[in-house]
Image: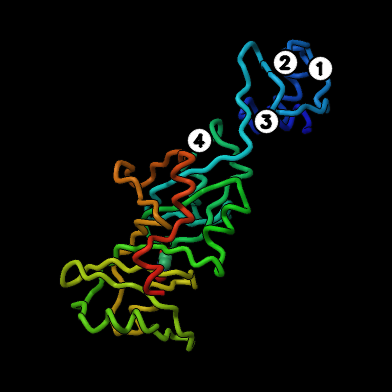
Amino acid sequence: MERLDKILANAMVGSRKDVVKLIRSGAVTVDGNVTTDPATKVNPDTSDMVANGIPVCYREHYHLMMNKPKGYICATEDLKEQTVLDLLPDDKFPKNKLFPAGRLDKDTEGFVFLTTDGKLAHRVTGPKNHVNKKYFVTVDKPIKAEWIQKFQTGIVIDDGYQCKSAFLEILSENTCHLTIFEGKFHQVKRMFEALGTTVIYLQRVQIGSLLLDEALEPGEYRELTREELELLEIVPEEYKENL
Ligand code: URA
Protein backbone atom coordinates (compact mmCIF):
# COMPACT_ATOMS: atom_id res chain seq x y z
CA MET A 1 0.00 0.00 0.00
CA GLU A 2 1.29 3.45 -0.92
CA ARG A 3 0.08 7.03 -0.58
CA LEU A 4 -2.18 8.10 -3.42
CA ASP A 5 -0.24 11.31 -4.09
CA LYS A 6 3.01 9.35 -4.33
CA ILE A 7 1.52 6.84 -6.75
CA LEU A 8 0.13 9.56 -9.02
CA ALA A 9 3.39 11.52 -9.00
CA ASN A 10 5.27 8.32 -9.84
CA ALA A 11 2.86 7.67 -12.70
CA MET A 12 3.79 11.12 -14.09
CA VAL A 13 0.31 12.58 -13.57
CA GLY A 14 2.13 15.66 -12.28
CA SER A 15 4.58 16.84 -9.65
CA ARG A 16 3.87 15.86 -6.04
CA LYS A 17 2.50 19.38 -5.44
CA ASP A 18 0.26 19.25 -8.54
CA VAL A 19 -1.20 15.89 -7.68
CA VAL A 20 -1.96 16.93 -4.09
CA LYS A 21 -3.98 19.85 -5.51
CA LEU A 22 -5.66 17.59 -8.06
CA ILE A 23 -6.68 15.03 -5.41
CA ARG A 24 -8.01 17.77 -3.09
CA SER A 25 -10.06 19.23 -5.97
CA GLY A 26 -11.98 15.95 -6.28
CA ALA A 27 -10.63 15.07 -9.73
CA VAL A 28 -9.30 11.66 -8.67
CA THR A 29 -11.23 8.44 -8.13
CA VAL A 30 -10.00 5.19 -6.65
CA ASP A 31 -12.09 2.16 -7.64
CA GLY A 32 -14.85 4.51 -8.72
CA ASN A 33 -14.97 6.60 -5.50
CA VAL A 34 -13.85 10.23 -5.38
CA THR A 35 -10.89 10.37 -2.98
CA THR A 36 -9.83 13.80 -1.71
CA ASP A 37 -7.19 12.86 0.85
CA PRO A 38 -3.70 12.74 -0.75
CA ALA A 39 -2.51 10.44 2.07
CA THR A 40 -5.05 7.72 1.32
CA LYS A 41 -3.29 4.35 1.19
CA VAL A 42 -3.89 2.49 -2.06
CA ASN A 43 -2.63 -0.76 -3.49
CA PRO A 44 -1.48 0.37 -6.96
CA ASP A 45 -1.44 -3.20 -8.30
CA THR A 46 -5.09 -3.93 -7.57
CA SER A 47 -6.87 -0.53 -7.55
CA ASP A 48 -8.18 1.37 -10.56
CA MET A 49 -7.22 5.02 -10.31
CA VAL A 50 -8.57 7.73 -12.60
CA ALA A 51 -7.24 11.31 -12.61
CA ASN A 52 -9.08 14.02 -14.56
CA GLY A 53 -11.00 11.29 -16.34
CA ILE A 54 -7.84 9.50 -17.53
CA PRO A 55 -6.95 6.04 -16.17
CA VAL A 56 -3.67 6.13 -14.27
CA CYS A 57 -1.03 3.79 -15.55
CA TYR A 58 1.01 2.88 -12.48
CA ARG A 59 4.68 2.16 -13.02
CA GLU A 60 7.00 1.09 -10.27
CA HIS A 61 10.17 1.61 -12.30
CA TYR A 62 11.48 3.28 -15.45
CA HIS A 63 14.40 1.97 -17.49
CA LEU A 64 15.98 3.75 -20.45
CA MET A 65 18.71 3.19 -23.00
CA MET A 66 20.40 6.44 -23.99
CA ASN A 67 22.97 7.09 -26.67
CA LYS A 68 25.03 9.60 -24.69
CA PRO A 69 26.54 12.39 -26.75
CA LYS A 70 29.89 14.00 -25.96
CA GLY A 71 29.76 16.95 -23.58
CA TYR A 72 27.41 15.44 -20.98
CA ILE A 73 28.39 13.83 -17.70
CA CYS A 74 26.87 10.73 -16.12
CA ALA A 75 25.50 12.26 -12.93
CA THR A 76 22.09 13.34 -11.68
CA GLU A 77 23.07 16.96 -11.06
CA ASP A 78 26.08 19.20 -11.39
CA LEU A 79 26.68 22.87 -10.81
CA LYS A 80 28.80 23.39 -13.92
CA GLU A 81 28.26 20.55 -16.37
CA GLN A 82 25.24 19.31 -18.29
CA THR A 83 24.14 15.85 -17.18
CA VAL A 84 22.49 13.00 -19.07
CA LEU A 85 19.26 13.81 -17.19
CA ASP A 86 19.22 17.22 -18.91
CA LEU A 87 18.53 15.33 -22.16
CA LEU A 88 15.22 13.98 -20.80
CA PRO A 89 11.89 15.85 -20.76
CA ASP A 90 10.52 16.83 -17.34
CA ASP A 91 7.00 15.53 -17.86
CA LYS A 92 7.57 11.98 -19.10
CA PHE A 93 9.91 10.44 -16.56
CA PRO A 94 10.44 10.81 -12.78
CA LYS A 95 13.78 12.59 -13.17
CA ASN A 96 14.25 12.84 -9.42
CA LYS A 97 14.40 9.02 -9.27
CA LEU A 98 16.25 8.16 -12.48
CA PHE A 99 20.02 7.82 -12.43
CA PRO A 100 22.70 6.51 -14.79
CA ALA A 101 23.87 3.01 -13.81
CA GLY A 102 27.61 3.27 -14.31
CA ARG A 103 29.54 6.16 -15.77
CA LEU A 104 30.91 7.20 -19.12
CA ASP A 105 33.42 10.05 -19.33
CA LYS A 106 32.26 13.44 -20.57
CA ASP A 107 33.93 12.83 -23.95
CA THR A 108 32.71 9.22 -24.30
CA GLU A 109 29.63 8.45 -26.37
CA GLY A 110 27.25 5.54 -26.40
CA PHE A 111 25.13 3.23 -24.30
CA VAL A 112 24.09 4.56 -20.90
CA PHE A 113 21.53 2.59 -18.91
CA LEU A 114 19.29 4.87 -16.85
CA THR A 115 16.97 3.36 -14.28
CA THR A 116 14.96 4.08 -11.14
CA ASP A 117 15.74 0.58 -9.81
CA GLY A 118 18.80 0.62 -7.54
CA LYS A 119 18.93 -3.18 -7.16
CA LEU A 120 18.93 -3.77 -10.91
CA ALA A 121 21.57 -1.06 -11.39
CA HIS A 122 23.76 -2.83 -8.87
CA ARG A 123 23.36 -6.19 -10.62
CA VAL A 124 24.42 -4.60 -13.94
CA THR A 125 27.27 -2.43 -12.68
CA GLY A 126 28.35 -3.94 -9.34
CA PRO A 127 32.04 -4.91 -9.53
CA LYS A 128 31.38 -8.44 -8.25
CA ASN A 129 28.84 -9.18 -10.96
CA HIS A 130 31.34 -8.96 -13.86
CA VAL A 131 28.82 -7.95 -16.51
CA ASN A 132 30.63 -7.30 -19.81
CA LYS A 133 30.76 -3.79 -21.30
CA LYS A 134 31.90 -3.52 -24.92
CA TYR A 135 33.50 -0.38 -26.40
CA PHE A 136 34.30 0.74 -29.91
CA VAL A 137 37.72 2.38 -29.63
CA THR A 138 39.81 4.51 -31.98
CA VAL A 139 43.45 4.99 -30.99
CA ASP A 140 46.23 7.21 -32.32
CA LYS A 141 48.71 4.44 -33.23
CA PRO A 142 48.49 1.10 -35.05
CA ILE A 143 46.97 -1.66 -32.90
CA LYS A 144 49.26 -4.68 -32.54
CA ALA A 145 48.05 -8.28 -32.77
CA GLU A 146 50.13 -9.16 -29.68
CA TRP A 147 47.92 -6.87 -27.58
CA ILE A 148 45.11 -9.43 -27.79
CA GLN A 149 47.10 -11.68 -25.47
CA LYS A 150 48.16 -8.76 -23.24
CA PHE A 151 44.55 -7.71 -22.70
CA GLN A 152 43.58 -11.31 -21.99
CA THR A 153 46.38 -11.74 -19.42
CA GLY A 154 45.51 -8.44 -17.67
CA ILE A 155 46.95 -5.02 -18.43
CA VAL A 156 48.69 -3.26 -15.53
CA ILE A 157 47.53 0.37 -15.46
CA ASP A 158 49.26 3.49 -14.08
CA ASP A 159 48.41 2.95 -10.41
CA GLY A 160 49.77 -0.62 -10.48
CA TYR A 161 46.36 -2.30 -10.67
CA GLN A 162 46.28 -5.40 -12.86
CA CYS A 163 43.03 -5.34 -14.83
CA LYS A 164 40.96 -8.48 -15.22
CA SER A 165 40.96 -10.29 -18.58
CA ALA A 166 39.65 -8.12 -21.39
CA PHE A 167 38.87 -9.06 -24.99
CA LEU A 168 40.32 -7.13 -27.89
CA GLU A 169 38.94 -7.55 -31.42
CA ILE A 170 40.96 -5.63 -33.99
CA LEU A 171 38.73 -4.01 -36.63
CA SER A 172 41.26 -1.92 -38.57
CA GLU A 173 44.71 -0.39 -38.07
CA ASN A 174 43.41 2.12 -35.50
CA THR A 175 40.02 0.78 -34.44
CA CYS A 176 38.93 -2.13 -32.27
CA HIS A 177 36.29 -3.45 -29.93
CA LEU A 178 37.38 -3.90 -26.32
CA THR A 179 35.22 -5.79 -23.83
CA ILE A 180 35.86 -5.33 -20.12
CA PHE A 181 34.17 -6.77 -17.04
CA GLU A 182 34.89 -4.05 -14.48
CA GLY A 183 34.68 -0.27 -14.43
CA LYS A 184 37.66 1.52 -12.95
CA PHE A 185 37.92 5.26 -13.49
CA HIS A 186 38.93 5.95 -17.15
CA GLN A 187 39.70 2.25 -17.44
CA VAL A 188 39.74 1.80 -21.21
CA LYS A 189 41.82 4.94 -21.76
CA ARG A 190 44.29 3.89 -19.06
CA MET A 191 44.61 0.36 -20.48
CA PHE A 192 45.60 1.75 -23.87
CA GLU A 193 47.89 4.36 -22.25
CA ALA A 194 49.70 1.44 -20.58
CA LEU A 195 50.45 0.19 -24.11
CA GLY A 196 51.76 3.59 -25.19
CA THR A 197 48.62 4.55 -27.15
CA THR A 198 46.03 7.28 -26.68
CA VAL A 199 42.30 6.73 -27.13
CA ILE A 200 40.94 9.42 -29.44
CA TYR A 201 37.35 8.19 -29.67
CA LEU A 202 35.40 5.96 -27.30
CA GLN A 203 31.86 4.68 -27.60
CA ARG A 204 30.12 2.04 -25.46
CA VAL A 205 28.21 -0.29 -27.76
CA GLN A 206 27.02 -3.14 -25.53
CA ILE A 207 26.14 -4.01 -21.93
CA GLY A 208 25.63 -7.71 -21.15
CA SER A 209 23.87 -9.14 -24.20
CA LEU A 210 22.13 -5.89 -25.11
CA LEU A 211 23.49 -3.83 -28.01
CA LEU A 212 23.16 -0.07 -28.32
CA ASP A 213 20.19 0.57 -30.62
CA GLU A 214 21.72 1.94 -33.81
CA ALA A 215 18.54 3.89 -34.52
CA LEU A 216 19.31 6.17 -31.56
CA GLU A 217 21.24 9.29 -32.56
CA PRO A 218 23.56 10.77 -29.90
CA GLY A 219 21.28 12.46 -27.35
CA GLU A 220 18.33 10.17 -28.08
CA TYR A 221 16.90 7.57 -25.70
CA ARG A 222 14.09 5.07 -25.45
CA GLU A 223 12.51 2.86 -22.85
CA LEU A 224 13.69 -0.75 -22.63
CA THR A 225 11.36 -3.71 -23.03
CA ARG A 226 11.19 -6.43 -20.37
CA GLU A 227 13.16 -8.79 -22.64
CA GLU A 228 15.87 -6.18 -23.19
CA LEU A 229 16.15 -5.59 -19.44
CA GLU A 230 16.88 -9.28 -18.96
CA LEU A 231 19.57 -9.17 -21.68
CA LEU A 232 21.43 -6.49 -19.70
CA GLU A 233 22.42 -9.06 -17.09
CA ILE A 234 23.29 -11.95 -19.42
CA VAL A 235 27.02 -12.34 -20.10
CA PRO A 236 27.43 -13.93 -23.59
CA GLU A 237 28.78 -17.51 -23.59
CA GLU A 238 31.81 -16.53 -25.71
CA TYR A 239 33.17 -14.50 -22.78
CA LYS A 240 32.17 -16.90 -20.03
CA GLU A 241 34.30 -19.66 -21.53
CA ASN A 242 37.42 -17.51 -21.45
CA LEU A 243 37.04 -15.93 -18.03
N1 URA B 1 36.69 3.68 -19.97
C1 URA B 1 37.08 4.97 -20.13
O1 URA B 1 38.27 5.25 -20.15
N2 URA B 1 36.16 5.91 -20.28
C2 URA B 1 34.83 5.65 -20.30
O2 URA B 1 34.01 6.56 -20.46
C3 URA B 1 34.42 4.31 -20.14
C4 URA B 1 35.37 3.34 -19.97
Q: Could you give the CA–CA distance between mark 3 and mark 1, rounded to whole angstroms? A: 15 Å
Relative to 229, residue 147 above or below:
below
Q: Nearer the viewer, mark 4 or mark 1?
A: 1
Ligand 1: which quarter?
bottom left
Query: How far is mark 3 from mark 2, CA to CA?
Result: 13 Å
Q: Earlier in the sequence, mark 1 or mark 2?
A: 2
Q: Regarding mark 4 in the picture, which secondary structure is present there?
A: loop
Amino acid bearing label 1? Thr
Contact check, label 3 and label 4, Cβ < 8 Å: no
The quarter of the displayed image where residue 2 is located: top right
CA separation in Å, label 2 and label 4: 25 Å
- Residue closer to the observer: 160 or 152: 152
| Position of the C terminus by quadrant | bottom left
Q: Which marked residue is nearer to the observer: mark 3 or mark 4?
A: 3
Give the answer, above or below, for where 118 lies relative to 107: above
Badge 3 residue CB within 8 Å of ligand 1 = no
The tag on residue 89 is 4
* Residue at image location 83% in from the left, 25% down from the top: 40
Q: Which residue is mark 1?
A: 36
- Callout 1–callout 2 Cβ contact below 8 Å: yes
Q: Earlier in the sequence, mark 2 or mark 4?
A: 2
Q: Residue at x 21, y 70 (%)?
A: 170
Depth check: give the residue in front, 167 or 67.
Answer: 167
User: How many dots with numbers?
Assistant: 4
Instruction: State which tag comes first along the sequence, 3 or 1.
Output: 3
Q: Label 3 vs label 4: CA separation?
A: 15 Å
Check disc 2 and give the amino acid type. Val
- C-alpha separation, residue under disc 4 versus residue under disc 1: 29 Å
Q: Note whether 41 is above or below 35 in the view shown.
A: below
State the residue position of label 3: 9
